[in-house]
Image (cartoon, rainbow, N blue to C red):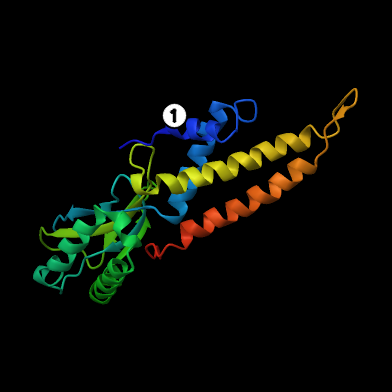
Amino acid sequence: MALDKEGMRNELRAMGISTTNISDNDVDSLIGFLISTYNAYRPQIRSSLITTIAYQEDYNWPTDAVAIKCVLWSPTVNESTWWPLWQELAERFSYSSDFNNPSLMMIYRSNMHEFDKQFGGNYELVYNSSGVRKIRLLPYPTSVVSVPVIYYANFTEATFPDSDYILLMDGLVAYAKETVSFGIQLRAGFKAGSYSLTGNAGENLLKMSGGAIKQWRARLSGLGYLDRT
């Protein structure tokens, strides 16, 4: 389900942050920034298969990959050894939000540890002469086989997980309040007759929003999500 940006804007307005404080376009820009920040902490974990060609060593990255986690290639490990583990992981990747469950995270890490033992050192990530990213299988395959690749991809507005809508909304509120505080401080010193505007309110709001932003980033990194190294 696509991210409901209009709903997020409406919720923000209901909290008293008007278009005078921050425009709809700026809210949309903030949402884009928040999704990028979310991806830095919690990218999508995906999987695909490379179909090898005999005596060819270099293969393309998955088109949406931003980083490669693991390539399950070894010329000496029988497919039957890793296939059951691979099937379990591939199914689990379809429900990545479940990895907030500590038990499932432990299963994931146990399986990844087994993969690292079996396949570590049998591939490297290189650039070819044209500067294109490639996965190099070591040694090169001598037959046609399927090689699983576990990788990271970015969430988009269309793929953002519904389960973290509230988390994203909390981030939007925190950053929107920070934007409002900047505006108040910029207008500090304005006078009209007996009316004057000081920067105290802006300073207090900036402190509050700064604390909320730190808490939001801590929640992104502290919910027991997947180890991305």
Residue 201 in percent (x, y) is at 76, 41
Q: How many labels does the image show?
A: 1
Quarter of the image for the N terminus: give it. top left
Q: Position of residue 160 (x, y in %)?
A: 36, 43
Compared with 41, 175 (above or below) is: above
Q: Residue at x 54, y 31 (%)?
A: 13
Give whichever of 23, 127 is nearer the camera: 23
Q: Is residue 135 above or below residue 116?
A: above
Q: Is residue 80 left or right of residue 73?
A: left
Quarter of the image for residue 175 reads top right
Residue 161 shows in the view? no
Name, please, the residue furthest toward the bottom: 117
Q: Assign the C terminus to one quadrant of the image.
A: bottom left
Of the pair 113 and 5, the residue shown nearer to us: 5
x, y (%) of residue 56?
20, 57
- Three-letter amino acid code at disc 1? Glu
Residue 50, image quadrant: bottom left
Lateral position of residue 79 relative to residue 127, left or right = left
Callout 1 crowding tier (Cα within 10 Å): few <14, some 14–19, many ≥20:
few
Q: From this viewpoint, is residue 201 visible?
A: yes
- In this picture, is 59 found above or below 22? below
Left or right position of 8 against 110? right
Q: Residue at x 10, y 61 (%)?
A: 143
Question: Which residue lies at the image location 60% right of the left edge and 28% below the top edge?
Answer: 18
- Residue 137 horizontal/vertical position (percent): 25, 63
* Residue sitting farthest toward the right: 193
Mark 1: which secondary structure?
helix
Q: Determine the residue positioned at 24% across, 75% down.
A: 114
Foreground of the two, 91 or 163 = 163
Q: Name the residue under label 1.
A: 6
